[in-house]
Image (cartoon, helix red, strand yellow):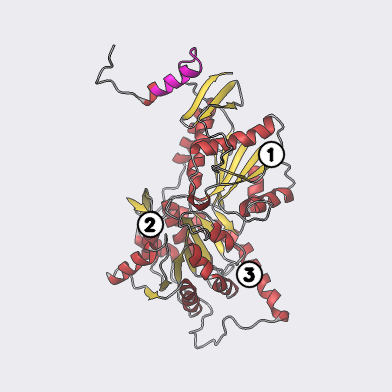
Amino acid sequence: MGKDKNSKITPEATAKSAIEAVNANQTSTVESPFNAEYNEQKKNKDSAKVKGTAAKKRDRMSGNEAVALAIKQVNPDVMPAFPITPSTELPQMVSTYISNGEIDTEFIPVESEHSSMSAAIGASAAGARALTATSSAGLAFMWEELYIAASDRLPLVLCLVNRTLTGPLNINCDHSDAMGARDSGWLQVYAETNEEAYDNFIMAYRVTEHPDVQLPMMVCYDGFITSHAVMNIETIDTDSVRNFVGEYKPDNFLLNKDMPMAAGPYANSPFYMETKYNQRAGMKNAKKVILDVCEEYEKVSGRKYGLFEEYRMEDAKYAIVIMGSAAGQTKDAVDKLREYGIHVGMIKVRVFRPFPGEELAEALKNCKSVAILDRAESFSGQGGPLGSELKAAMYDAGLNIPTVNYFYGLGGRDYTVTEARDVFRDIREIVRRGREPEQFKYVGLRDRDADNSNEFRDFGGDDKMDIRQSGDGVRLSDK
């Protein structure tokens, strides 16, 4: 009997067929009480959200377009820059705004990234609100200057569009550029989405220019994944942005003729340690300032931020900790597994410097096992940057939780929802079967001895369910 040409294959029919393939007696999906409870909680949270005082506009933009718009709305004084993929669009777009008379920022074309940071340092020391942008080897070329900017306590902003460091040569995303500079004394904040990158830049100067901080900040977001992909975004009006950011009025600056000063003087042994201690104090103070600025920004934009985001962590037994755009795939995996009653959750680290170790440990204290995912190698033999620091924080907090450090997405390697579910499966098996965790796995590594088949893998549920997983989705059967 031939098929009806007008018949359509629906997702519901496909799901039903998949279920029947595993168990002919099971012909309907099970509505999880955990998912229903979460939906109710989410509905209550949404109704309690702050609406924000700013006028809003819905648009579609790439991450670079969104951050360029934020730069335009803030209208900083000086922007030196040298183009490098995938941040090239930022100086291109900002210089176009300037050429069209839309902002009065002074754009300085330079011959290298080292010079762009040098010029930004000079502008900031002179009393201007300054910024620049770069990626990958461009940040590495700024290396010497990064430490000068931080030790001089200059509140400038660097838009860092994350890209892997050479070699071998690669233009795609990982966090090796930013992580190489993690101890330079700069604040670091990461974005998952284009809208978050936009918001992070708007908040940046309020943090860096605070008298209790006075440190430069890297506004980081993933190259190509966030910088070039177009997403729906909600922007706020320019007047609200400028009122929120305010006018820059530095207390001390080189062009202040009434108070002569030196910037970056020679500091020998009797003075050097004190400068480092003062930088440390500024970094420590930044936690509270960041939270205060986020709270104030929520009143304007209606969007809530913190040091990190907890996603379905209220009763999570198994958690993934991650940074950047890959949080989206992990959230999808969490939602899918929650449908079947598996208590999983995710924490997205937004602020890496200052590192919120105590706060993260508190958020993870009720978990049975934890996976920490790094998008940069440190070659320490003891884990990646995020893994090493979070494990140390958990140890200091007295947490004896099985914790596994994974590496993912290096050089732009895809990180999928299926792989996120595999990670949850791994850390769950540690608890269920008392398996000794294998540390420092590479997620998605091509291995000739690996099982790359699409066979179903056992993934037992927390209750009376057995979930089997494959590349084409999750299937349910009786246990």
Residue 378's place in the image compared with 249, above or below, is above
Residue sitting at x 50%, y 53%: 411
The amino acid type of the residue labelled 2 equals Ala
Which mark is first along the chain, 2 or 1? 2
Q: Which residue position holds label 2?
A: 66
Which label lies toward us, 1 or 3? 1
- Residue at x 59%, y 36% (from the top left corner): 424
1 or 3: tag closer to the N-terminus: 3
Residue drawn at point x = 40 percent, y = 23 percent: 14
Secondary structure under the numbered disc 3 in the rendered image = helix
Residue 172 part of the magenta-drawn span: no
Residue type at tag 3: Gln
Asked where in the image residue 446 lies, by quadrant, the reply is top right
Residue found 52% across the figure and 22% down from its top: 476
Q: How crowded is the residue under tag 1: few (<14 C-alpha within 10 Å), some, or many (20+)? A: some
**Quadrant of the rendered image containing residue 259:** bottom right
- Range of residues picked out in magenta: 14-27
Residue at the farthest front position: 448
How many angstroms separate mark 1 from mark 3 (CA)? 38 Å
Specify whether residue 422 is in view: yes
Q: Amino acid at mark 1?
A: Pro
Q: Is residue 20 magenta?
A: yes
Q: Residues within 10 Å of mark 3 (few under 14, many from 20)?
A: many
Q: Which residue is mark 3?
A: 279
Disc on the earlier residue, 3 or 2? 2
Q: Residue 81: percent from the left, percent from the top?
A: 42, 71
